[in-house]
Image (cartoon, rainbow, N blue to C red):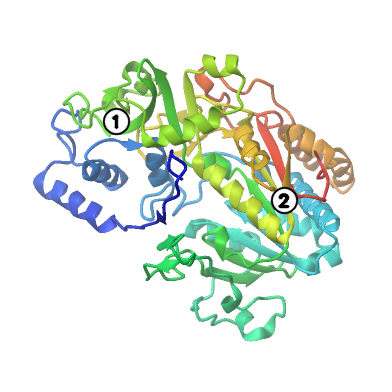
Amino acid sequence: MDPDGSTRRALEVAIDRAGLFRSIEQAQRDGGHGASSSSPHAHRHLEGLEAHLASIIRFRGGPITLAEFMQECLTHPEFGYYMHRDVFGERGDFVTSPEVSQAFGELMGAWAAWTWESMGKPSTVRIVELGPGRGTLMADLLRGTKNLREFTDAVAVHMVDVSPANRKAQREALKCGPARETDAENGDNELSRGKNPRRRGLGEVRVPSNPMTIRGGSDGEEASSGGSTREELGLDTVDVGVSGINGAVVEWHETMDAVPPGPTIVIAHEFFDAMPVHQFTRTERGWCERLVAISGDVAKGRGGSSSIGDESSRDGDESSRAFEMVLSPGLTPAGALMVPRRLEGVDASRRDGLRQLEISPRSLAIWERIAARLEEHGGAAIAIDYGEEGPLGDTLQAIRDHEFVDVLTDPGRADLSAYVDFGAMRRVIETRKNSGVECYGPVTQRDLLFGLGIGQWLEKMVEKCATEKEVDKLIAGCERLVSGEQGALGEGGRTEGAGKGAGMGFRYKALAMVSKGLGKPAGF
C-alpha cells in the first residue's frame, strides 16, 4: 500500500550472494587487504567469520545492520556459533532451565497435556519445539507424560532447528538412535514405507506458496518466477526417528513451515532471545540506526555514518576488534517502518523519554505465523525467555564461558542474545484483524512453575530419592528455577548475572497464545 492509499504489486526476490562474498574474501586474501588500511587490523589478514563479515560490508559499500551481523554470527553454515558444537550446560557457555532441573521439562509436559485436553483431545497433536538445544526439554516432556497413554498415542513430535550439531544431540536425548543415511526427499526409510501408521508421508507435507512470485496480478493469481526447490524453501523433513522414551514419532525440520498441518502445541524456550535485533538511537537527526562497520572505515569517511564513540567500546578494548558500532546519518528504511509501529500505543511520557530502542522484527513475524497456524488448525503456543514488557533499549549481550564478553570481538565464538520484548509480541496479536487467537501474560517463570505445581512435583520426587545428596540436588535445581531478584535489567538495559548460579524466577517470563475458546492456559 502506497502512502496515497493505492495498491501496488509486491515482488519478492531471493538472491544467493554467497559466491560473490567468497570472491571478495579470496581477493582480499590474495591482495593482502583483510581490513581497512586505517584499521589496527591492517597488518593481518582477517579469517573465518571476520573475513566473511568484512566481505559483506565491502560488497554493500558500507555498514550492515546489527541484525545482519547477529544472524551471521549465530547461524552462518560454516562459522555460526550454533552450527557445529555443543554450547549448552556447565561445560558450554550458558545454562538453560531444562539443564538446571528435569522439573522444567516435566512441567512443560503437564502444560502440553492440559492444553491437549482443553483442545478436545484431538487424535493427533503436533508438539513443535522451536530451537530445542540439546533436546533436554523435549526428552523430559516425553518422559514425564509417558504414562498418559491417550496423550502419548496422540503426540507427534516436531523439532525445528537449523543446527546439524544440535539435531545430533537431540536424537541422542530422545533416544532415537543414530541418524539414518537415507534420502529424506524420497522418504527412503522404514517410517515412510508404512511401518508406523502415525507417520505422515513426506508427500503430504504442505508446500506454501513459492516466495519467488509476483502477488496480486490483474487476474488475482500468483505469477511464478519459478525455480525454488523444497530444499531451498526449507520444506523437507531433514531427519526422522522414533523416540525410545515413549514411542512417539519425531521429525526434524529447518523451518516451521515444514511441519504438516493439524492441531498444534508450540513450545519456544530461549528461542526468541536469539532472533536478530535492530537498534536505534534518538539523536538531533531523529532515530538513527546502530550499524556495524569495519574498524577505521568511518574515520576514513566510508559509508556516510558516524562513530558512536566511547559507547561502542564499553564491553572491551576497541583496538582489539575488527569491527565497530556506528550510527546511520539519518532514519533508515528499517527505522521508518519499525520505530513508529513499536511506539504506537506507548504512553507519551514513556515514549518521549526513550533514547534507545531495540526491535526484533523476525520475532514478531514468527509469532504472527504461529498465530496464523493456530487460527487455522487450533492449539496453543508458549514462549519462555528472559524479557520485559518493553519497549526495550540496548539489551544485546554476548556470553562465553558463562561470562559477558564484547559483542563485536571474535564473532561466532560467543552467544549473542537480547531480551525479548513481550509487549511487542502481545501487541501484534491484539491488533491483528479478526484475530482467532488470544494472548496471556507475560508472567514470571516463578509464577508459571508454581501454577503448574512445581511444589507438588518436588514433594513427590523427594520421596523417591535414596540419599540426602539426591534430595539436595533436586531442591537446589527447583530453587534456581524460581528464585532470583526482580529488576533484572542493569544500567543501559544490560542484564546482570550471567554466572552459573544466577536465579531464573524473575528474569525469565512466559507469554502464551491460544485459539479463541480454549480459555486461560494453565499457569497463567
In the visual, does 289 lie left or right of 302?
Answer: right
**Residue at the spot of label 2:** 436
Residue located at (69% from left, 55% from top): 374
Vertical placement of residue 296 versus 363, above or below: above
Snapshot quadrant of residue 385: top right
Amino acid at circle 1: Arg
Secondary structure of residue under mark 2: loop
How many residues crowd mark 1 within 10 Å: few (<14), some (14–19), many (20+)? Answer: many
In-front residue for pair 467/328: 328
Q: Which mark is residue 321?
A: 1
In this rendering, the count of numbered labels is 2
Q: Position of residue 72 (x, y in %)?
A: 38, 46
Residues under numbered marks 1 and 2 in contact, where contact means CB atoms less than 8 Å apart? no
Vertical placement of residue 378 versus 522, above or below: below
Upstream in the sequence, badge 1 or badge 2?
A: 1
How many residues crowd mark 2 within 10 Å: few (<14), some (14–19), many (20+)? Answer: some
Q: Position of residue 154 (x, y in %)?
A: 78, 67
Q: Position of residue 250 (x, y in %)?
A: 65, 67
